[in-house]
Structure formats: structure tokens, C-alpha cells
């Protein structure tokens, strides 16, 4: 759960670079230990306490680098109690204007807001009540990869909501507006079931690179922002 740290650091201080760890090989020579690349994150929150809580949880993690400003290479973590027009505007600015990736940590979200959030370009959502450090890092890393990361209950609500929209559109029009290849449909169907890249590759007997290429190709061609947006499109158009 997000809460303020007992002795907070400066909220926007950049995490200092850590010295490269070294070890010795069998011959006794000193060699560098390869460490994973840290994901740059900027935290924005509805109040100072929520901001401090999120920053304190992420700053301690070696996978994360806290930054002051969002940009193309950063993931913006937005903490809100509930959504309003101002929060949606911030999400749109982060993704569309600044070219960043976004994770939404939220207390409640109404049915009519969920699709708006996905279409803003948000691919990862975390309930505030579940916002442990481990959960936040997983969502940030998923967003950085362009993957979707939604709680199971929200994924079910998204599928139900888009299905309702599709049935209404189908009664007026009929056929999908743009084509998806069978391979793309297969991949998106498994994405909608919550599988990650490795699981999809195993299920379809593809390489992980093939799965990533399929997703990149369809999101680029159809101007979709991430996996969650692609699933919403496929559901709305009646492919899955």
C-alpha cells in the first residue's frame, strides 16, 4: 500500500549512479558484473503523501531510476484516488505530447472511464490497495516494454465493455473496418487472456521475437499505442 515514508528524501531527487559491482573470476582477475538496465521513472501524484510513498518504494529498487521530468525514455507513474478530467488530461499529455509511457495507480475507476484510460495510451494499471513495491516495479517494466498489465477484474470489465460497444456497432454497420492477419488475431487473443510474450510464443510455437514483431507491426499499422489498446481495438472490431 502507498504511504508516506517516515523520513522522506527530497521527492524529486535523481537516484545517484551506483558503482559497477565487480567480482573475481577463477584466475583471480577482477571482472565487472552485468546488472540490468534501470528503468527511468517520474512520479506524479494527487497529493504529497502519495508522491512520497511511491517515490520511497521505487527509489530502493535497483531496477528503477527516479527522474524529475518525463520524456520519451521514461515511464510516468501517475497516482490518483479517482479519475477526473484533469487526470485524463495529464495522461494524454504524457503519452501523446511527451511520447512517454504511463502507469496509472488508482483507487477507483468507473466503467465509462476505463476505455478512456486505455485509449489515452495507458497500458498498465495498478489498484492503490495492491501497490506494493514489487507490483509497481512489475507494472513499470511492463509499460517500458510496451506490454499490457491490468488487474484481472479490470481486464474482464474491459472485455465486457468493448464487447457491448462492438455489438452496438455491428448492429449498425456489419464488418470490421480494417483487416487483421490470422497470426495477429491469434496473438491478440492470447494477449487478451493475460499471457506475456514468452507464454504466447510457447503457446503458438513462435519465437519471442516473432511475437514482438507481430505486435509492433499491427500497433504501428493501426496507430495503436500499446497492447491494451490493440486488444480494445480487436474486441471493438469483432476479431476476438
Image (tube, rainbow, N blue to C red):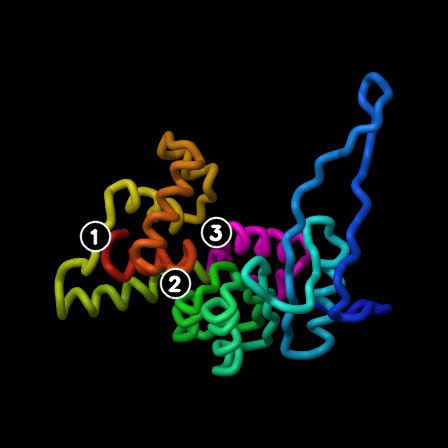
Describe residue 162's horizontal placement relative to residue 29 as left or right. Answer: left
Could you give the CA–CA distance between mark 1 and mark 2, rounded to whole angstroms? 22 Å
Can you see residue 1? no
Q: Residue at x 84, y 28 (%)?
A: 30
Of the numbered discs 1 and 2, the one sitting upstream in the chain is 2
Local crowd size for mark 1, using a 10 Å CA cut-off: few (<14), some (14–19), many (≥20): some
Q: Which residue has dot 3 on it?
A: 147
- Can residue 49 be spotted in the picture? yes
Residue at numbered disc 2: 158
Residue stretch in magenta: 125-153
Residue 155: image x %, image y %? 43, 58
Nearest the viewer among 238 and 39 is 39
- Judging by the rendered image, the residue that carries numbered circle 1 is 179
The stretch drawn in magenta includes residue 146: yes
CA–CA distance in space, label 3 to label 2 = 16 Å
x, y (%) of residue 131? 64, 61
Name above or below for residue 66 compared with residue 116.
above
Q: Is residue 80 above or below residue 178?
A: below
Identify which residue, 5 or 223, lies in the foreground. 223
- Side (left or right) of 181 relative to 30: left
Q: Residue 49 location, x and y as percent?
A: 73, 75
Estimate the spatial distance between the alpha carbons at disc 3 and disc 1, rounded to whole Å: 22 Å
Judged by depth in the image, the label closer to the viewer, 3 or 2, is 3
Amino acid at each position: 500500500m502507498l504511504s508516506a515514508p517516515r523520513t522522506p528524501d527530497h521527492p524529486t531527487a535523481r537516484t545517484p549512479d551506483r558503482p559497477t559491482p565487480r567480482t573475481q573470476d577463477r584466475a583471480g582477475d577482477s571482472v565487472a558484473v552485468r546488472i540490468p538496465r534501470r528503468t527511468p521513472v517520474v512520479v506524479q501524484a494527487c497529493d504529497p503523501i502519495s508522491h512520497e510513498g511511491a517515490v520511497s518504494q521505487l527509489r530502493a529498487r535497483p531496477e528503477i531510476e527516479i527522474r524529475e521530468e518525463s520524456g520519451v525514455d521514461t515511464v510516468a507513474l501517475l497516482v490518483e484516488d479517482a479519475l477526473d478530467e484533469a487526470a485524463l488530461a495529464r495522461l494524454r499529455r504524457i503519452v501523446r505530447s511527451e511520447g512517454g509511457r504511463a502507469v496509472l495507480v488508482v483507487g477507483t475507476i468507473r466503467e465509462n472511464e476505463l476505455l478512456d484510460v486505455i485509449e489515452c495510451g495507458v497500458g498498465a494499471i495498478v489498484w492503490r490497495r495492491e501497490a506494493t513495491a514489487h507490483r509497481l516495479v512489475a507494472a513499470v517494466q511492463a509499460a517500458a516494454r510496451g506490454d499490457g498489465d491490468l488487474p484481472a477484474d479490470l481486464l474482464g470489465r474491459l472485455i465486457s465493455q468493448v464487447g457491448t460497444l462492438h455489438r452496438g456497432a455491428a448492429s449498425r454497420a456489419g464488418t470490421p473496418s480494417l483487416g487483421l492477419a490470422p497470426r495477429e488475431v491469434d496473438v491478440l487473443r492470447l494477449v487478451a487472456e493475460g499471457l506475456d510474450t514468452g507464454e504466447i510464443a510457447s503457446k503458438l510455437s513462435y519465437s519471442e521475437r516473432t511475437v514482438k514483431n507481430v505486435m509492433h507491426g499491427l500497433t504501428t499499422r493501426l496507430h495503436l499505442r500499446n497492447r491494451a489498446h490493440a486488444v480494445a481495438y480487436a474486441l471493438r472490431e469483432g476479431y476476438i
